[in-house]
Amino acid sequence: MSAGTVTVACKLEGGLILEADLQALPANDKRGATRLAIQIRGPASRNQPPPTYPLVGGFGITPGVPRSIFESWCERERVNGFASALASGLIFADEDISRVMERARDHAAKGKEAQR
C-alpha cells in the first residue's frame, strides 16, 4: 500500500464510515489503536442542516484520509456492498484535492447531460 493521504469524494447521501483492522496496515497508519473508523462525508440527509464541509457537484469532500485505509476498504468492498458505488464513480479518491473536485464537477455535468 502507498503512504500518504487522499481526498475522498462521496455522493452517497449520508456518507459512509471506512473501518480498518489496523493489524493489517503499515505501522505509520496504526495510530495506537487496533481498529479505526473514518467518517466519509456525503452530501447529507434531507433531514439534516446543510453541511459545513465542501460540497462539489453533489459530492461530500473528505480530505486527509490515509491512503492505505482507503485502498484497503476499496479492496474489501469491490466484492461487497459498495462495489457498484465504486464502479459508477459515486465514491472515488485522489491524492490531489483539485483533481477530486474537477472529477466531481465533471460527474455532475455528465449527470445533467443525461437528464436532457
Image (cartoon, grey):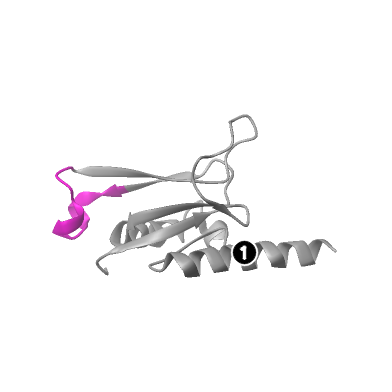
Crowd rating for badge 1 (residues with CA inside 10 Å; few <14, some 14–19, many 20+): some
**Compared to 15, does 49 lie above or below?**
above
Of 46 and 98, nearer the camera is 98
Quadrant in which the C terminus is drawn: bottom right
Residue numbers of the magenta segment: 20-33
- Answer left or right for 32 relative to 18: left
Q: Which residue is mark 1?
A: 105
Amino acid type of the residue tagged 1 in the rendering = Arg
Of 47 and 35, nearer the camera is 47
- The image position of residue 68, as x and y in percent, is 29, 61
- The image position of residue 74, as x and y in percent, is 41, 60
Quadrant in which the N terminus is drawn: bottom left
- The image position of residue 27, as x and y in percent, is 14, 57
Of 105 and 65, nearer the camera is 105
Residue 25 falls within the magenta-colored stretch: yes
Tell me which residue sits at (57%, 58%) in the image: 90
**Compared to 20, does 99 lie above or below?**
below
Q: Secondary structure at mark 1?
A: helix
The image quarter containing residue 57 is bottom right
**Compared to 82, does 75 lie above or below?**
below
Of 26 and 21, nearer the camera is 26
- The image position of residue 3, as x and y in percent, is 24, 67
Q: Residue furthest right?
A: 116
Residue 28 falls within the magenta-colored stretch: yes
The number of callouts visible is 1
